[in-house]
Each structure stands twice: as structure tokens, then as C-alpha cells.
Amino acid sequence: MDKIEFDDSKYDLKSLLDAKHPFLEKMRERAPGTYKHSQNVASLCESVALELDIDQNMMRVLGMYHDAGKVTFPECFYENQNGSGNMHDKLNPLVSFHLISKHVSDSALILVQLDDFPNELIEPITQHHGNTVLKSLALKADGVEEDFFRYKNTCPPTTLEAAILMICDSIDAIIRSKESNDKIDIDDIREIIRNTIERLEGDDQLDEIRVGDLKKIKKALQRDLESKYHKRSAADYEEDDDKKVKDLKK
Ligand SMILES: [Fe+2]
Ligand SMILES: [Fe+2]
């Protein structure tokens, strides 16, 4: 599978990654949930880039800007709904599909207008959902073919970087949806990584990727997320201990 031909000396990727970049400030303000998700995806992309010897800043930029289009209608997306209710509860799933899937072309539209954004990175961003199915909507719509709810984008992704972005994006989305219901541990993380990759493979989204590269991607994701969740559960224990001590002192 080809890598993106990219000369990072032509661009100032550090300024694109600076939290004070005007577009990132806009995203943080208008779509805080998407901003957080993008930070998580960028961090996963960076870990994978390190393992595969890919430009780490370029991968972080892909992660940080992949959902840029969501700023045009932030409340349409689960991560920005924060107790304000889910607008899709009242909508026909066919309408919801158009509103949600549009964020991919909106991202391209926004990024071509950002003077400092590398043109070469727009295509992998347009491929980050491949032609996967928007499952939650497909399940809601009775009697409509599941294929209707497929994103209308290139499948499989044409570059290694686009495939990595797709995997990291799907994994963070699953972690966030599971975390909103329950605490998750290292075993859950392993299962999420395995299931997500198997699901994408089963849907032909990763047909072009080399087996060796996929192994390295899994390894990097496991290392990154296991250390994060290990630290988190250690912090939970400390919190529990502190609480017990406080309760004893009462
Ligand atoms: Fe997306
Ligand atoms: Fe995303």
C-alpha cells in the first residue's frame, strides 16, 4: 500500500497543531466534543506513525482535522450533544444519514479554504469513513437496505495514512461510546482493538494494507491505550483509597 507523497518542509505543521490556530480555536469553541475526539485520534495516529516510521506531525494533523466539517453543524453529532438531547430521535433516519455523512465533504470544503492546510492531506481525510455503514441509523430504519446507509467514499482507503486514520477514528469512537456507559479496562481495550480491526477487514475497508503493517498498527495502539488505561485504573484505585481514608476519619 502506498504512502502519501508529502514534503513537510513546504508547510508549517507545528502551527496547524498549535491549540491557538484560529481553526482549532473555532472547533474547540463550537464543537468541544469533536475537538476532544480529534485530540484523541491525533494522539493514536502519532503513536502508530512512530511505529511505522511515518511523519508524526503529518499524522497528528490528519487526526486533528479529519472531522473539521462537523463545525458547520456541531449539534448533529453525538459527541457535542451533552445533555441537550439527540436531535436524530425526532428525525427520519434517511434525513439523519444525509446530515451526518455530509461532514466528510464539509471537511474537504473547509480545508481547501484554509490557506495553510496541505492539499495532499485532504484526500486521506475524505477517505476516513471509507464506504462503511452508519449502523445506528441502518438499525433504526425499517425496510431500508443497509447499503443505503453507506458513506459514499473511496473504499478501501488508497494510502497507508488514510487506513491508519480510519482505524484510529473508529477505535476512539467505540471507546467513547463504551465509556459513556461504563468504566473500561485493559481487557476491554484489547477487545475493542481486535473487534474494530476485524470489523473493518470484514467490510473490505482494509483490503490494501500489508499484513506486517497491520500488525504494527495493532501493536502501537495496544501499547498506547493499555498504558493510558493502566494509569487510569491505578488513579481510580488511589481515588478509592483516598475516599476510604476520608470516610474513616468522619
Ligand atoms: Fe468522521
Ligand atoms: Fe472522527
Image: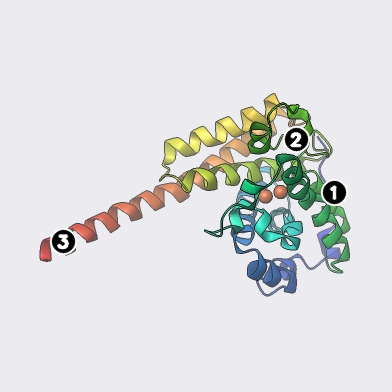
Q: Nearer the viewer, mark 3 or mark 1?
A: 3
Question: Foreground residue, 232 or 2?
Answer: 232
Q: Where, by quadrant of the figure, is residue 213 drawn?
A: top right
Q: Secondary structure beneath disc 3? A: helix
- For marks 3 and 1, the one nearer the N-term is 1
- x, y percent for residue 161: 75, 45
| Number of marks in the rendered image | 3
Where 73 falls versus 160 (above or below)?
A: below
Residue with the mark numbered 2? 149
**In this figure, which residue is indicated by the disc labeled 3?**
247
- Distance from label 3 to label 2 (Cα)? 52 Å
Label 2 neighbourhood size at 10 Å, few (<14), some (14-19), many (20+)? many
Answer with the quarter of the image where residue 84 lies.
Answer: bottom right
The verdict on label 1 being within 8 Å of ligand 1 is: no
Residue 90 left/right relative to 101: left
Query: How crowded is the residue under tag 3: few (<14 C-alpha within 10 Å), some, or many (20+)?
Result: few
Which residue corresponds to mark 1? Answer: 123
- Between the C-alphas of marks 3 and 1, the distance is 56 Å
Distance from the alpha carbon under mark 1 to that under mark 2: 21 Å
Disc 1 + disc 2, Cβ < 8 Å: no
Q: Quadrant of the N terminus?
A: top right
Q: Residue at x 78, y 32 (%)?
A: 148
Quadrant of the image containing the C terminus: bottom left
Q: Is 193 placed above or below 115 here?
A: above
Q: Is residue 119 left or right of residue 27?
A: right
Residue at point 81%, 47% (across, down): 126
Find numbered disc 2 in the image and state the secondary structure of the residue it sits on. Answer: helix
The type of residue carrying mark 3 is Asp
The answer to whether one can see residue 6 in this image is no
Camera-nearest label, 1 or 2: 2
